[in-house]
Amino acid sequence: MEERKMMKALRLNAPNDFEVTEVPVPVAGESEVLCKVESVSICGTDPHIIKGEFPGVWPQEFPLIPGHEWAGTVVELGDKAADFGWKVGDRVCGIANLGCGHCKNCMEGRFTICLNYGKPRIHKMYGHISQGAYAEYMAVNIRAISKIPDYMDFDVACQMDTMSIAMHMIERSNFEVGDDVLVSGAGPQGMMSVIIFKAMGARNVYCAGSGVRLKKCEELGAIPIDYTKEDVAETIMKYTNGAGVKRVVECTGTAKGVYASCWSVARGGAIATVGFPAGDVPMPVRHLVMDEISFNGSRANPNTLDKAIVIASQHLDDVKNLVTHVFPLTEYPKAYEVFTKRLDNSIRVVVKP
């Protein structure tokens, strides 16, 4: 890499002020690898970061290279990386979170709720606090990446951050084979959840959504419920003879979605949520108590990346077909507009550095 000192990257200088420019190629530190980034998927969190909706948190300071849903190839090894079996040429994908590795939560495997979160000397969160993936090269800790099969396209592999988040959410719902489930929300998280539930042996997978995205979930095997035309909870009760579904994964992040989830779940069942409401939402707590319903928050993807890769490797076409648009990094403003405005029925928008 001696001959390559500078690289193209998307640099966020201030809220809503970003540019594709030249920045220094990062150096792989201890337990890190330098990767050539091949594909980056725009995440729903990216626009919130770009707009400055988490001031002083994501990012803590400017400038920042955003992006965290990525895949690429290892081109350099930092100190100790080889000792853990990493090699130049390894094909990998990554996640955003890297806990400190030493606090109680990290030691228990819950590194997405690291007790040292936000301390940049000992904690990283790529594309949020730490420099991310909208660049030709990225230095990343080996604990935040996994190898991908040779037959997995990079455009599929960069979806694994999203898919592993859906996997964690499903695990937080205490899902068991044969359960009836509701996926509340037909966005990317909902679509990934449908794929995973079907792969893991759910009996009936219901999905509440609307429009083109609900149709896509139906194509993936879900029983569609159009929330613009039907009451979701009433429809679920009709389908289940009044019993409700055993598990709900809530992906909308809306008061309506959360409320419908609470009244769709069976007695003794569980709801897991990854939706991120703008503010607090009302919940029928008495109902949750009396029917002993668990309501579990789900943050990111601790230790689920490899599981997502296994499922995706068996459902390559389903995942690949979620990618509707591909742009070079130099056309990021256009990619950003297509994604944020859902132009041309966009679902997953991939950027190629």
Image (cartoon, grey):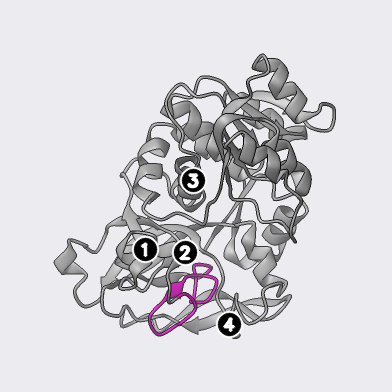
Q: Are marks 2 and 4 in contact (CB under 8 Å)?
A: no
Distance from label 2 to label 4 (Cα)? Answer: 15 Å
Q: Is residue 271 shown left or right of residue 176?
A: right
In the rendered structure, find residue 60 and report the number of the disc placed on it: 4
Which label was assigned to residue 96?
Answer: 2
Q: Earlier in the sequence, mark 1 or mark 4?
A: 4
Label 2 environment density (alpha carbons within 10 Å; few <14, some 14–19, many ≥20): many
Residue 323 appears in view: no
Q: CA distance from mark 3 to mark 2?
A: 13 Å
Q: Is residue 118 magenta?
A: yes
Q: Which residue is mark 3?
A: 163
Given the image, on which type of amino acid does mark 1 rest? Ala
Determine which quarter of the picture holds residue 143: bottom left
Cα distance, mark 2 to mark 1? 7 Å
- The main secondary structure of the magenta stretch is loop
For this orientation, the residue located farthest to the top is 241
Q: Which percent across, then down, holds residue 108?
A: 32, 60
Q: CA distance from mark 3 to mark 1?
A: 15 Å
In depth, the one of 159 and 52 nearer the eye is 52
Q: Secondary structure at mark 1?
A: helix
- Mark closer to the chain start, 2 or 1: 2
| Amino acid type shown at disc 2 | Ala
| Residue at the right extreme of this rendering | 229
Could you tell me the amino acid type at mark 3? Answer: Met
Residue bearing the label numbered 1: 144
- Label 2: which secondary element: loop
Observer able to see residue 206:
yes
Q: Are marks 3 and 2 in contact (CB under 8 Å)?
A: no
